[in-house]
């Protein structure tokens, strides 16, 4: 069977930067360590007044196609994943297609376009749709362009405000890819949940503490479902574990559970049993509460072992490199984690070809998905040209007053308008409203 996966990626960050421990925590009378230590975040990327999900998605896509010298005729579908859409009928992919046609040769007239919704999960679902389309040989030799794009803003004063972000990732999915190939197996954990939702409203209704528990529960189910197809896994069989990262502290919680689950029954697991005792089992306790208390205590001890710490430092921490600087990009978050891992491997000159990644995606509402990816021979060149960190360094840092105006400008219910804080160059910008209430865009040279 042919390998199918991600051939190339590009990233576009919102052009403003809010320093969380320095600016946000200070004004809110919070300890900066809540951000740096607790949540694991140093800053959020936020959109300037001329940026939105279309401009960021189109800019990421244009970067990707230009850099890889891919013409529009080589694309057979454009799928956009977002949970920040502003239209219930016309998909964002049509706007992005229009943007690309305005600056590139050729058209996307015979390109299938859509928009996927399942909270933060839908970027991964778009990748899977692209995989199926190519595997079914319905692509006529063409690649799929998958774009995840969000302005992840919460209502002012909501606890989620600490985890905001804005940006887009564009991915080219093709047969015989340069970056990573997807596993055929996918594990799913899905249940009707009301942890985080936006019932026809811009900012989420969120039960933050519960959302953390739902994330962990659905991820565990997805892992079990994945293992049911692959057989037992070993934590060290994966070079990195990029997970959905609403904030790095969430991944810290998920990682130790994934380690606990996959180390069971391995030689390393036996070694750990000698060191800290066996993993508690439900059968050994009379009540659920007693069992939960015991498994929590065991997990804390496990997280303190040398074996776990080394595993986390080598295989999980590097995946958090970008997200700790940009916040939650919703549908893009897990894709930033994959990029972070590959950048880390390139920086350390690691031989990664043939190694595997264990990728865990999550969307509130709720569904988790786990699949594996095999790193391809062209990975180093493909990741070397992404240049995401130089883009982050160019962000304009904003004051708290500016933050308040930026937030209000992007609030659909507010009349606030502001002059841009940055000067656009070689990018798509929002250019006002058309006669039917459509948003309009232009390219600034
Ligand atoms: P909060 O009330 O702002 O923060 O809520 P907190 O008081 O819980 O503190 C956060 C962590 O920092 C805690 O660590 C504190 O102990 C620690 P934990 O107990 O969790 O390990 N902390 C400190 N550490 C050191 N020094 C200090 C200090 N102070 C506190 N001084 C919450 C945090 C995440 C709940 C909030 O930001 C929120 O509601 N966020 C939005 C929801 C969210 O991100 N949920 C994550 C799982 S759901 C998900 O990922 C889906 C999502 O991406 C949406 C989608 O799918 O579309 C959100």
Image: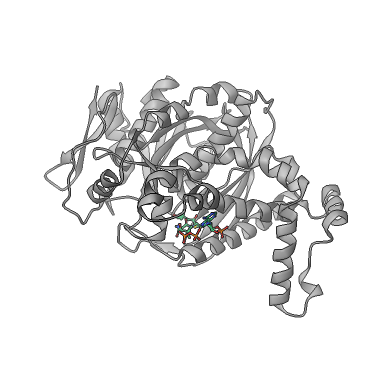
Is residue 399 found left or right of 436 in the rendered image? right
Residue at 69% across / 33% down in the picture? 355
- Whether residue 329 appears in this view of the structure is no
- Whether residue 138 appears in this view of the structure is yes
Compared with 35, 13 (above or below) is above
Give how far across and how far down residue 39 sits, in percent: 51, 51
Compared with 312, 345 (above or below) is above
Q: Residue furthest left?
A: 435
Q: Quadrant of residue 381?
A: top right
Question: In what quadrant of the picture does the C terminus appear?
Answer: top left
Q: Which residue occupies the foreground of this view, 330 or 422?
A: 422
Residue at 65% across / 35% down in the picture? 374
Give how far across and how far down residue 337 sits, in percent: 54, 40
Give how far across and how far down residue 410 sits, in percent: 26, 48
Q: Which residue occupies the foreground of this view, 258 or 46?
A: 46
Q: Could you tell me how many numbered marks the image carries?
A: 0
Q: Which residue occupies the foreground of this view, 256 or 214?
A: 256
Compared with 276, 383 (above or below) is above
Q: Quadrant of residue 292?
A: bottom right
Residue at 59% across / 23% down in the picture? 380
Question: In what quadrant of the picture does the N terminus appear?
Answer: top right
Q: How is the image coloured?
A: one colour
Give how far across and how far down residue 388 sits, in percent: 46, 29
Q: Which residue occupies the foreground of this view, 353 or 167?
A: 167
């Amino acid at each position: 069977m042919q390998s199918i996966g991600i051939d190339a990626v590009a990233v576009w960050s919102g052009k403003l930067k809010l320093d969380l421990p320095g600016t946000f925590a200070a004004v809110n009378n919070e300890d900066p360590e809540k951000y740096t230590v607790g949540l694991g975040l140093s800053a959020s990327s936020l959109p300037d007044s001329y940026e939105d999900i279309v401009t960021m998605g189109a800019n990421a896509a244009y970067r990707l196609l230009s850099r890889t010298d891919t013409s529009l005729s080589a694309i057979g579908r454009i799928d956009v994943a977002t949970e920040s859409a502003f239209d219930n009928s016309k998909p964002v992919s049509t706007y992005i297609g229009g943007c690309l046609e305005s600056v590139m040769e050729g058209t996307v007239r015979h390109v299938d376009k859509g928009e996927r919704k399942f909270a933060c999960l839908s970027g991964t679902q778009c990748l899977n749709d692209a995989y199926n389309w190519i595997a079914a040989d319905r692509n006529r030799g063409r690649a799929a362009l998958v774009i995840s794009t969000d302005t992840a803003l919460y209502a002012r004063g909501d606890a989620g405000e600490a985890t905001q972000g804005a940006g887009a990732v564009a991915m080219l999915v093709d047969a015989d890819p340069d970056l990573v190939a997807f596993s055929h197996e996918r594990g799913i954990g899905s249940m009707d949940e009301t942890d985080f939702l936006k019932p026809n409203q811009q900012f989420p209704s969120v039960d933050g503490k519960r959302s953390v528990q739902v994330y962990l529960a659905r991820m565990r189910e997805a892992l079990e479902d994945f293992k049911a197809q692959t057989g037992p896994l070993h934590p060290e069989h994966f070079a990195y574990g990029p997970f959905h990262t609403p904030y790095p502290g969430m991944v810290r919680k998920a990682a130790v559970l994934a380690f606990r689950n996959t180390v069971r029954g391995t030689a390393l697991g036996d070694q750990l049993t000698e060191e800290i005792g066996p993993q508690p089992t439900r059968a050994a306790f009379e009540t659920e509460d007693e069992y939960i208390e015991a498994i929590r205590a065991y997990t804390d001890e496990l997280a303190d072992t040398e074996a776990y710490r080394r595993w986390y430092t080598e295989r999980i921490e590097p995946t958090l490199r970008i997200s700790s600087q940009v916040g939650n990009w919703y549908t893009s978050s897990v894709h930033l984690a994959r990029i972070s891992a590959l950048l880390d491997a390139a920086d350390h000159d690691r031989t990664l070809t043939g190694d595997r990644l264990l990728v865990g995606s999550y969307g509130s509402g709720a569904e988790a998905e786990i699949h594996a990816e095999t790193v391809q021979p062209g990975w180093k060149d493909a990741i070397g040209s992404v240049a995401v960190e130089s883009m982050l360094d160019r962000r304009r840092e904003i004051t708290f007053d500016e933050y308040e105006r930026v937030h209000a400008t992007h609030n659909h219910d507010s009349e606030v308008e502001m002059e841009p804080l940055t000067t656009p160059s070689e990018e798509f910008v929002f250019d006002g409203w058309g006669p039917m209430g459509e948003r309009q865009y232009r390219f600034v040279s």
